[in-house]
Structures are given as structure tokens and as C-alpha cells.
Amino acid sequence: MSDIEDNDGDEYDELSELRQRHKPESQPSVDEAFDLDDLLPTIGEFGKYQKLLVFGICLPACIPCGFCAFNQLFMADTPDDYWCRIPELLDMPLEQRKSLSIPKELDNDELVYSKCYTYGVNWTQLLESGEEDDLTTMEPNASWPLIKCPQGWEYNTSDVWSSIVIDFDLVCDRDIYPTIGLAALNTGGPVGVYLFGLLNDRGGRRLSYFVCLATLLAGSLMTSLSKDFWTWAGSRVIVGLTIPAVYQIPFIISLELVGENYRSFVTVMTCTFYTSGIMLLSGVTYLERDWVRLSYITSLPFYAYFLYMFVMPESPRWLLMRGRLEEALKILERMAKVNGREFPEAVHLKLEAQIRRDKLKKQKKKMANVGLADLCRTPNMRLKTILITLSWFANETVYLGLSYYGPALGTNQYVSFFLSAVVELPSYLCCWYFMDTWGRRWPLSLSMILGGVACVITVMLPDDAVDETLVLYLVSKALLSASFLIIYPFAGELYPTQVRGIGIGASSYIGGLGLIGIPFITYLGKDNLKLPLVIMGFLSMLGGMTGLRLPETLHHRLPQTIEEGEEFGKNWQLKDCCRCAQKPEILSQPASYENLDVLAGSSTNASEVELELRDSRRVREPAPRIDERTPLDTTASGSGRPVHRPSMKRLVRQMSVMDTQRTHDGTMQLTHWI
């Protein structure tokens, strides 16, 4: 009984101390900046409104991105056999025509008809001369010169009967043209992210999305109507402008409207639907082999997405940034109503006070001017920036390269492409678990290194080991898919909040440059099927090994300022490579991982803190507490003096918060992350 009284007494003392420490000042709600993340727990972090938004708008928006990014692979199918076209001999049977006009050459110790050369003979003059009465007995003369095909090609259309290769004669000296078209598609990506990013920030999410969608569909229509290669390639640049922006914009709206604890779920579901769209594309391409109709089928249905104009909301965060208070409140109140919650009346006053304050301070207050140079000014931040960028470049380049190379492996390109997408699904779920248990660094590095090893050892297999090569490829694709999901949040956690948007933007843009060159790596597979896998394997292993030098972020408070970022991981040692995420230290139990200064803004919030604290007292077993101190905090504590900075106001949860790049005011931006 006395123990119970002592416990109650301790609880009373702790509650009293809590009230005293977080006693509201005279005007706390007016002076403290409003954060939408503080309101979401009240009106619903992932209620009915957000579920309708995510599953009805955000996730379906992933499908056109996958369709239009990869349908090009099947538009450029190359027939297995082709030969020079001789119009004067088209009336002859095929075999006689080839025997008379096409020379033979040695290919893999076998004599086959040449695909790029014919005899340089004036066939009209030869036929009119009457020297040969019976064409069936005519034989090629060894003295006839050889020339490149002057009048196009004929194709074996038993398997591939429609493609841009056939229509535009993209073989022999022009067989690299489809690769140029793929590079053209990837060239548009970084440019589009920049342009639509500007429109996204200045015109709003809704306008940016529908302009992006219209651009995608216009480029796809231009693709379908192309009559020559360069028009087709230009249309692919237009399509590339919208990838990945066409699904990132609604993705950003969803992230801005769901609570922090659900953002990792939204991200994983987005990747899952993106992969499901690619799986669906493999079925569509199998059923439709005509490249023009394929272009229509993979674009026309998405005109229905313009119906989202009637249901897609504008981002309240963007509206608040622009000072459009009434519109933001209308959306937030509708969200609370659909979620079955009551919208707090105090929020109206706080928002109005913030808008007035921001207008008054707009001309007086200047934000800290930080740029890319700040990431490279100090040695530790410079090293981490280089390592993050190298790892990002290798990861994104190899992942997309493997995606492009899937149809070239196995015995059926449609099955191989489908399997290359299927193996991504379990990898997403596994890495979601491992990155919250083992940390970020080891799952990222191991998946990249092992994925690279799986690619490299294909060179040890014989040429006829088709199935074994495909299996190793699928293992590598699954591992690289997992690392591709990890690299984004890991980079976001390593870059300090003050320069996080700049850092992620720079790393993703440099990574996007690799996508322009990777089609030329896969092009090397025409002569040696395993050479692209070996090159991508070594690049993946290099990126994985650079990731081992990065500090672990799980169970660490994220750096906020550039100074904290310089200190974070500064004392790294070689033995840290062999260490997974550290166990969270057992510290005192506050109500939650959130900073209590934020929760103490009103009496209502204070009562919620007390309620959580009382609930936690009923569980007598101590729970692990995350050590949210930065190296700067540790240094300061050694001197006995606490360090207080504005950047330490909010503590960030560590459960795989897969955020996107933000500006200083919290609004999310586009990045080149497919």
C-alpha cells in the first residue's frame, strides 16, 4: 500500500513539475508559429479523408508514370532477322531473293546472311540485259562489290511485326537510335522537375499537376503520330519532362495531409502501386504488339484523370504559405468533418495571428542565406555530401539500368519484364522492416553490394545458361529495389534540416544525370549480353561500399543546423562499419517523442500530455527511450552547460519518416526520385 502511495506521490510531483515547466506565457498561441503537423492529430492523421485522397488520387497517379516511362522499351523492339531490301527483286521468292542479293558472313562460327550489306549491282540493268533467261538459276558473282543497304530493309515479322525500328529502319548503322530515344526520355526528367517544381511552388499543387498531366498526354499523342525518328525522339523528351513529376505532385499533397507516422506507409504504398503499374504494362504490351496502338492504349485512358479537378484539394500548407487563410481553413474543416473530428476553434485565431505577423515581418525578416556551398565548406559535411551523392548516383543509375535491361534477358521479354517488377514488391516490405531494426546504413550497403555481386558473377556462367542468368538478375533487381527505397530517407536524415532541401535536390539531380548515360551501357548488351550486368554490378558495389562510411541515423536525433551536421558522425571510426544501429538508451519517459514545448501551447494540450503520462505510469516496465541528443548536445553536457537553439524546438520521430524535400517554411518540393 505504501508503494502505491509513493508511486502516486511521484506521479503528482512529476505532473506538478511538468505544469510548472510548461506553464503558458501570456500570449503563447499568438507568438508561436503554427505547424500543420500539430493540428493533424486533432483532426485526424490518417482518417477517411486521407484514405480517400491516397487510394483514390495519389496511388492511381503512379500508373501513367510507369506506363509512359517503360512503354518505349516495347515500341523499339528489334526483329531477330532482317536484310537489305532490293525493290527490283521483290517479285522473286524470299529465299531466292536473299540467295541472289545478300552475301553471307561468319557469325559465331556459322555462315548467315548479312543484315547490313548487299551486292552493289545495278539489278535493273542486269535483268534487262537478258544475259540470264531463268532467274532461278542466277548465282551471285564473287566479283560483285559489297555495299551498305541503300534502299532500306526487309524484316522477319513472325515475332515482331510493328515497332519504330521497322517503321524508321533503325538497324545497322542506326541501331543506336532507340538508345538515343531512351536517353532523350531521361534528359527531360531533371528539366521537368525544375520547371514543374517552380510551378508547384508558385501556382499551387493542383495547377502544376494538371499542367503536368496535359504535357504528358500531349507528348504521348505526339509519339503516336510521329512519322520519323526525330519527331518521335522529340516527343519522348516532352514525355520525359513529366517523369517523375506526374506522380510526385499528388504524392506531395498526400504527404502534406497525412500525419508524420503515416508518411512511410504512403511512400511504400506509392512504390508498390508504381511497381504494380509496371506489372500491368507487361500484360498490355504482351496483348498489343502494334507500337502506335500501344502508345494510344498507354495514354488515352489517363485523360479521365482530368476528372480529379472536381475532387483533388489544394495543399493547405501551400495555401497557408501564400496567406490564403480562408481556403486553407475550408479544406482543413472539411477534412475534420469527413474524419468525424471537431475542428478546434482556437486554430482560427492562431492562423489569423500568424498571417498578420508574417505580413508585418515579411519585409523585415530575412531568412538565413544557405546554399550548396555550405554543404562543402566544412570537412565532415563535405565528405558526407560526396558519399551520399555517389551512393545516390550509383543506386538510381543501376536500378533504372536493370529495369531497362529486363526484356533483354530470358527467353520471353514480356515474362522477364513482368518478373523484374514482381521481385520489387517483397523487397519493399522487407527493407521497411530492416531499416527500422538494423538501421539505414547496413541494409543500404548490403543490398547494393550483394546486388552488385549477383550481377558480376553472371560473367562466370556459360552463354547458354539463360535461366540462371535471369535468376541472378532478378536477385540483383530485388536488392537494388530495396536500396532504392532506403537511399531517399537516409539522405534526408543525414542532411541538416537547414540545408536538407538543397542537399537532397543536388544529390537527386546528379543521380538523374546517370540516367542519361545508362541506356548506352545497356546498348553494349547487343554484342555481349553480360557486359552491362558486369558494369552495373561494379558500380553498385562501389556505391554500397561508400555507404559504409556514412554514420547511422537510427535512434539519433536528426541534425538541424549546419553546425550540428558537421558534428554528426565526425568521430567515425573504422570499427563503426561493423556495427548496426545502436540500441536506444534507457532514459526518463516523457509523454511522447515530441518536444513538450510544442505541446504546452494551451491548456488543452497540457491536459493531453498529463493523460499520456498517467497512461504510461500504468505500465511499470521501462520502455526503451530514443537518445535524441546530437553530438553538439553531448559536447555541451560535458561542460555542464545546456545548449538551447531554435533549431532544437522540435524532435523528429525516427520511424522511417520518408519525407520529400522541403523549403524553409515546410512546404514540400519535387525531387528527381523515381
Image: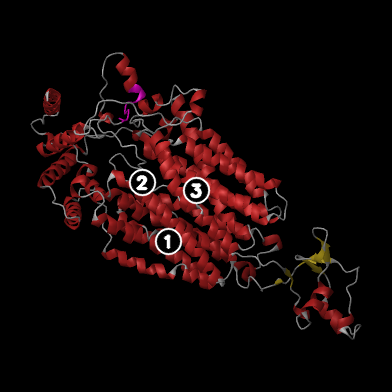
Give the structural element (helix, strand or loop) at label 1: helix
Residue 579, x across and y down, in percent: 47, 28
Q: Does residue 672 appear in this view? A: no
Residue 652, x across and y down, in percent: 30, 36
**Image-quadrant location for residue 109:** bottom right
Residue in the foreground of this view, choosing between 367 and 437: 437
Mark linked to residue 264: 2
Residue 622, x across and y down, in percent: 27, 29
Give the structural element (helix, strand or loop) at label 3: helix
Q: Residue at x 60, y 52 (%)?
A: 471
**Image-quadrant location for residue 375:** top left
Q: In this view, does 282 lie above or below 554?
A: below
Instruction: Check disc 1 and report the residue beneath it.
Output: 63
Residue in the foreground of this view, choosing between 187 and 522: 522
Query: Of the residues shown, which amino acid type is indicated by label 1?
Result: Ile
Q: Which stretch did the figure color magenta?
A: 624-632
Q: Does the magenta stretch include residue 473?
A: no
Residue farthest to the front, as pictured: 1
Mark linked to residue 481: 3
Q: Please report whichever mark, 1 or 3, sits nearer to the chain's N-terminal start.
A: 1
